[in-house]
Amino acid sequence: MPPLRVGDNALVKITEFDRGRADPANLIVVILEIHDGTKYVVGTKHGRLDRRLERNALDTTRYNAISLTDVPGVEYSLRELVKLASVGTGQGYRRCLCRQKCGTNRCSCFKGGLKCNSACHPRTNCNNH
């Protein structure tokens, strides 16, 4: 494995246990610090990872999307960072299960600013499509 330096971008493979169906399979990170030559402190555009990673958990990439100055100082777990980088809502999909027309704040989709989908209520008409 080629060595990584501070400022290099890398990919962290996300296990199926730590990600939802719409979450990315890899997370693009930047190397912030190297401890003892084997432990890496990494960060994303959303924050720093709260633990150090071994070299075998990181894959090299030529895609340079993140610089050291793009990483805020807040720390998150790996699952939280994946959720922040996702287009989905983390490990589950949101749905409302309403029996009405979904036009008020009683509907969790409407209240959250989301459109209802087929998982919410496939047999009823909805005003929030």
Image: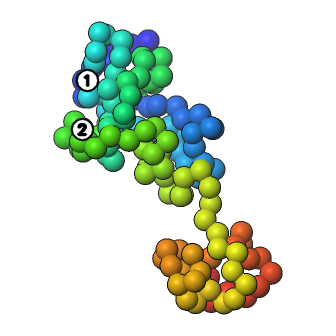
Residue sitting at x 63%, y 38%? 16
Quarter occupied by the C terminus: bottom right
Residue 67's disc number: 2
What is the secondary structure assignment of the residue under circle 2?
A: loop
In-image side of 73 versus 27 (left or right): left
Where, by quadrant of the figure, is residue 93 drawn?
Answer: bottom right
Q: Which residue is mark 1?
A: 33
Mark 1, Cα crowd under 10 Å, few <14 / some 14-19 / many 20+, is: some
Residue sitting at x 42%, y 17%? 55
x, y percentage for residue 71?
26, 42
**Distance from label 1 to label 2 (Cα)?**
13 Å
x, y percentage for residue 126?
67, 87
x, y percentage for residue 6?
24, 23
Residue sitting at x 44%, y 12%? 1
Q: How is the image coloured?
A: rainbow
x, y percentage for residue 26?
50, 37
In-image side of 2 versus 102 (left or right): left
Q: Earlier in the sequence, mark 1 or mark 2?
A: 1
What is the secondary structure assignment of the residue under circle 1?
A: strand
Where, by quadrant of the figure, is residue 32 drawn?
Answer: top left
Q: Identify whether 6 is placed above or below 19.
A: above
- In this rendering, the count of numbered labels is 2
Mark 2, Cα crowd under 10 Å, few <14 / some 14-19 / many 20+, is: some
Kindly tell me whether residue 15 is visible in this rendering.
Answer: yes
Residue type, numbered disc 1: Glu
